Image: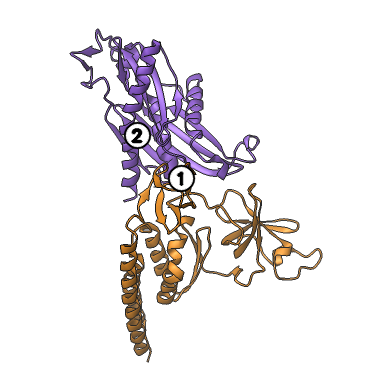
Chain colours: A purple, B orange
Amino acid sequence: MASNVPKKYEKLIVNGKRLDGRKLDELRPTKIEVGIIPSADGSAYVEVGKTKVMAAVHGPKEMFPRHMMNEDRAVLNVRYAMLPFSTSDRIRPGPSRRSNEISKVARHALESVIFLEEYPTMGIDLTLDVIQADAGTRATAITAGAVALAHAGIPMKGLVAATAMGKIDGKLAVDLNGPEDNFGDTDMPFAMVSTNKDITLLQMDGDFTPDEFKKALSMAKKAIEPIFEEQRKALLRYHE
Amino acid sequence: MTSVKIISKDSKDKIKTEEKVVTAKVEVKKDETNNKIVLPGDVLVESIDFLAGYGTYREGKKIYSKVLGILRKQEHAISVIPFSGLYMPKAGDFIIGEVVYIGYSNWKVDFGCPYDATLPMSGIPEFIENGADLTRYYKRGDLIFALVDSATKGMIIQLSLKDRRTRKLFGGKVIKVPSQKVPRIIGKSGTMISQIKDKTGCIINVGQNGWIWIKGDNEALATEAIQMINKMSHKSGLTDTIAKFLNKGAGKNIAEDKKNE
């Protein structure tokens, strides 16, 4: 059982480099695949470091439950879930306080780019399943969700990508991994639209000074560009 | 006698395909930016001289793509044909549907959209006597090639069978493709679909909703050709590829026929 208990790290930054050898403004290696679930209308698989997320879109289809139906626009229904085997401790399946919250923020992050008014009375189901969790699951889920929606042919203003900003050992760093998230000071998930650079998700756990916050935001905006590039490459690769 | 006829047919077809090849080449030269794959949020053009067509939206001077699909640039309009997505009925479309429910004075028709369409009693050309059993005209499972009479934003869709081109479909089989592929299956002024009809001898009806009804001895070959178009829809020179494929297939079939004789 000892292996399940996270190791305590003395220092998260050694010789200017992070534990996994990254620079402070460097993302984890990102891999995106499109169309991995044939039975879904759109699907995507995203790997950011050790975090792995699978997204599937079903719809637009008849809204269920019926009383949630909206007469003049479609309803996006997002379900985020960490699968029981995704962490070292088994996660009890079914909705929890945390997964309900993330489903809601992921919906808000993606809803604003979708032309929901084109499908009145219908519902779009988006499922975000975390296969393996190593920090940044909500950010990775949003990245995957946007690709799956695009693959499903749903009209969107642009793609949405997400990453996290954080503070480790008093320094700002991009895209925290597991140990950094557990033993760092601050974690700030962040999502942005590819076209007008609108921020659609911004949460913060921990604290930043106003100056640090401003710097973190500008760092995040710069760091997120490679994710847009990966999303684009993945979608083009699928249709070649 | 029969063999002579076939040879003459083949030679005619060869001439036809040669002509098509030439026209296809000209097309490719004309539009270099055309047929490019674009993603949602891609800037297509930055000018107010263009009209934002299907699959695009305008914000200020820029026109962006709304969907993942293929760019179609015309002189003054720009549009994107999506790879996938839901078929949304428009008034004036011809669709193929299946009768799924018989009501008191109407039929409900499924055509691959989340909401069923209604075929009212007044929408069919036959005279219906008061209190007649509606299953005498259309029963559950019947296929119809119908005209969309009206489609509201709230998904109330009315069909009509009063148009000359609409009819009930007897026998045959239906294959379903994404509705976005329909223009490609029909081809420019119907070249693609007419060549499939000619070479397989099948009767084919294509609904705008992506349901295709095929009837004839060569159903399998026609289905395969349509599935090929479905898979390679974003490639150029498709009419030529399909012509080659059909020629091979048709040749095979003639050989089989000879064996059987």
Q: Is residue A123 above or below residue A130?
A: below
Percent x, y of residue B29: 30, 63
Label 2 Cα neighbours within 10 Å, binned few <14 / some 14-19 / many ≥20: many
Q: Position of residue A13 (x, y in %)?
A: 23, 13
Three-letter residue code for mark 1: Lys
Query: Residue A36 or A33: which is nearer the viewer?
Result: A33
The quarter of the picture where the C terminus of chain B appears is bottom left
Question: Which chain does tag 2 point to?
Answer: A
The residue lying furthest to the left in this view is A15
* Cβ atoms at labels 1 and 2 below 8 Å apart: no
**Which image quadrant for residue B161?**
bottom right
How many dots with numbers? 2
Horizontal relation, residue B135 to residue B5: left or right? right
In the rendered image, is residue A155 in sight? no
Residue under pointer 1: B66
Residue assigned mark 2: A46
For disc 1, the neighbor class at 10 Å (few under 14, some 14 to 19, many from 20) is: many
Give the alpha-carbon distance from disc 1 to disc 2, as whole Å. Answer: 22 Å
Q: Are marks 1 and 2 on the same chain?
A: no
Q: Amino acid at mark 2?
A: Val
Q: Position of residue A91 (x, y in %)?
A: 42, 21
Identify the residue at image location x=32%, y=57%: B32
Q: In the rendered view, does A173 fall on the left or right side of B113?
A: left
Q: In this orientation, does residue B119 appear?
A: yes
Q: Does B141 appear above or below A87?
A: below
Nearest the viewer among A213 and B39 is A213
